[in-house]
Amino acid sequence: MICSFIGHSKIVDARDLEIRLRKVLVEIIEEKEIDVFYLGGYGDFDMLCAKVISKLKEEYMHIKSYLILAYYSPKMNQQNAMLYDGTIYPNLEHIPKRFCILERNKWIINNSEIIISYVKYSFGGAYKTLELARKRNDVRIITLHTR
């Protein structure tokens, strides 16, 4: 089963968020048998998620994390080799470049059973992506913040 993440590029409560994120990740790994994580790789929230998952691999050696690319770049594969188990590039070559991140985000949503959300504001790209995820009836959304 696959889990992905939706969140703002900037976070202010990183330490508290890291604790809550780790607790949720342990729970879904142990109880929901999540073993694959998809990450977008942009911003503070995605980086925090990638680092927490990387640390959890010491305890849960079977879990894998993949950076989902909006644009194909061999350089991205090399830069992220230490943090992720690999990269996936959905076939977005036919998409105009200004829409590639949105289409990548749709691909992530459509290929996930659980989404962990850190969306505090009702505007911006993270909010729009969360709204797309909410339209799916078969995805579980776990919220990491309180408004």
Image (cartoon, rainbow, N blue to C red):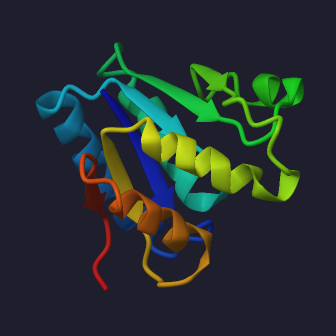
The quarter holding residue 19 reads bottom left
Q: Position of residue 128 (x, y in %)?
A: 53, 70
**Looking at the image, is 90 positioned above or below residue 147?**
above
Is 3 above or below relative to 139? above
Q: Taking the image as drawn, is residue 86 in sight?
A: yes
Q: In the drawing, does residue 70 fall left or right of residue 113?
A: right
User: Nearest the camera: 138 or 72?
Assistant: 138
In the picture, the quarter occupied by the C terminus is: bottom left
Tell me if residue 19 comes above or below residue 13 in the rendering.
Answer: above
Is residue 47 toward the left or the right of residue 138 in the image? right
Please report the residue visible at 51 percent of the width from the left and 42 percent of the height from the top: 108
Q: Report the front residue among 142 and 112.
A: 112
- How far from the left and from the top, in percent, is residue 96? 85, 51
Quadrant position of the N terminus in the picture: top left
- Position in image of residue 100 (x %, y %): 75, 49
Q: Does residue 18 appear anywhere in the picture?
A: no
Q: Is residue 90 left or right of residue 127?
A: right
Residue found 23% across the figure and 31% down from its top = 29
Rendered residue at 30%/39% (across/down):
113
Q: Is residue 22 left or right of residue 45?
A: left
Would you identify the image quadrant in which residue 64 lies?
A: top left
